[in-house]
Amino acid sequence: MYNPSAAGVTVNTESGNRFFVYEVVGLRQTDESDATTNQIRRSGSTFITVPYNRMNQEMRRITRMGGQIVSIRPLGEEGTSNGRHTPTVSQEQTQKEAQPSKPMTQTKAKKATTEDIPVNIYKPKNPYTGKCLSNEPLVREGGSGIVQHLTFDLSAGDLRYLEGQSIGIIPPGKDQKGKPHKLRLYSIASTRHGDHEDDKTVSLCVRELVYQHPETNETVKGVCSSFLCHLKPGDDLAITGPVGKEMLLPDDEESTVIMMATGTGIAPFRAFLWRMFKEQHEDYKFKGLAWLFFGIPYSANILYKEELEQLQAEFPDNFRLTYAISREEQNAQGGKMYIQDRIAENAGEIWNLLQQPNAHSYICGLKGMEGGIDEGMSAVTSTQGVDWLDYQKQLKKEHRWHVETY
Ligand code: FAD
């Protein structure tokens, strides 16, 4: 482990060569912890000095050793001096200070220059005519509903996009008023390079909307989702966009990315994970932590199951995968296991991760899923004197809390 004071390094808090002090409790004494030279033990807490570019790694090491980080502060701030920390503040104060202050914010999900983010290259009045290349089922036998993975050819136009953006689809035909149908938005499920990695395709993950009409009890199918789910290879379709700046991936290769998806909310996260792990890039090599929470009704509804589990097996140190299978698993109270129950189970660790200045959280899928997630997080932060909703506001301000629900 790198020890700046032992190495005689001048700590420069203005530049990227910054160091932070983790206050850790509950650390098990192991060969690994004993081997760490940059730690000081005082009254139940251990203070570990960490260079900025190793924050994620160190966080994972501490978790492995059973430790819990109770505060993070830049080295050299009040109470610290060259890594020698004097614990004079209360835990409540410490937690408040641990909230990332402005200078600690290193990572903005929004790209530095907004001109780099493609938006509305094709507008509804002049959409791009794409072609369906493939349309594959994602729900296996025993699952509920129809969800399809669709790939469209973009080679005849200028449509480009980034991971986390959406495109619009204008279904053919007219609505009940005799007007052309309005566009529907769909999160892009492929990376900017497309599933064929040739920059010429875009993919979607679409659930066919089917419901019983509340008055007539007739089965009604959604106009656009039904059109898409039954498209055949070779069929044309009208595409607009791309749109969206809310769900972009941070540029920082060391960042922590916590993803919470229900159903087709997996779409942008598939794009993230492909970019992080599956594709190899000269200018982006992900070395941080990605943690996906995925809520579905049945195991047969785990969309992209094989691909996700293969990535998890290949990158166990950098990718964690946690399912919540509501109709097959039970929560601690014996009820159905929803995504918020998994968040509640892991809220302590998520809270630790979110206190890192380069951690981002993303929610995508069913409207209303945020409420349960907030409850789980509140339960943990309140034990440390932190109001979760206030903290979340700060995360939003720093573009580190991203939500797209529909
Ligand atoms: P429509 O024909 O437009 O019917 C929808 C309408 O049916 C509703 O407005 C409501 O009036 C009615 N309705 C629906 N359910 C019921 C019910 N139970 N009881 C009574 N009435 C009901 N969808 C995906 O599948 N995958 C995605 O990746 C995706 N990404 C999205 C990203 C964004 C940013 C947004 C805003 C939406 C996204 N959607 C996604 C949803 C998508 O845009 C459409 O809303 C969805 O496919 C339904 O459109 P439709 O044309 O099939 O339904």
Image (spheres, rainbow, N blue to C red):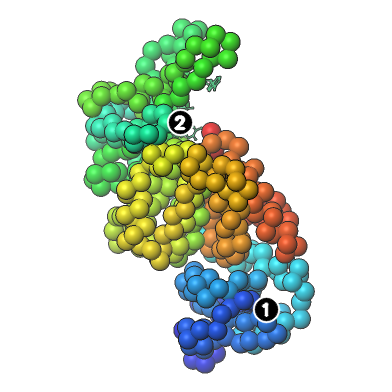
Is residue 48 visible to the viewer in this orientation of the structure? yes
Q: Name the residue under label 1.
A: 77
Label 2: state its secondary structure: strand
- Quick check: 152 left or right of 330? left
- Give me the C-alpha separation between circle 1 and circle 2: 47 Å
As rendered, which of 269 and 11 lies closer to the eye?
A: 269
Give how far across and how far down residue 41 sits, in percent: 63, 86
Give how far across and how far down residue 177 sits, in percent: 50, 7
Establish whether ligand 1 lies closer than 8 Å to the Cβ of label 2: yes
Q: Is residue 219 above or below residue 7?
A: above
As rendered, which of 108 and 134 lies closer to the eye?
A: 134
Establish whether ligand 1 lies closer than 8 Å to the Cβ of label 1: no
Q: How many marks?
A: 2
Give how far across and how far down residue 355 sits, in percent: 61, 64
Quarter where residue 383 is shown: bottom right
Going from N to C along the chain, the mark reached first, 1 or 2, is 1
Residue beneath the point at 34% across and 56% down: 311
Q: In this view, does 298 lie above or below 35?
A: above
Check disc 1: other Cα within 10 Å, few if <14, some if 14-19, many if 20+: some
Give how far across and how far down residue 14 sits, in percent: 57, 74
Amino acid of disc 1: Glu
Residue 185's label in the rendered image is 2
Is residue 14 visible to the viewer in this orientation of the structure? no
- Camera-side mark, 1 or 2: 2
Residue beneath the point at 47% across and 72% down: 57
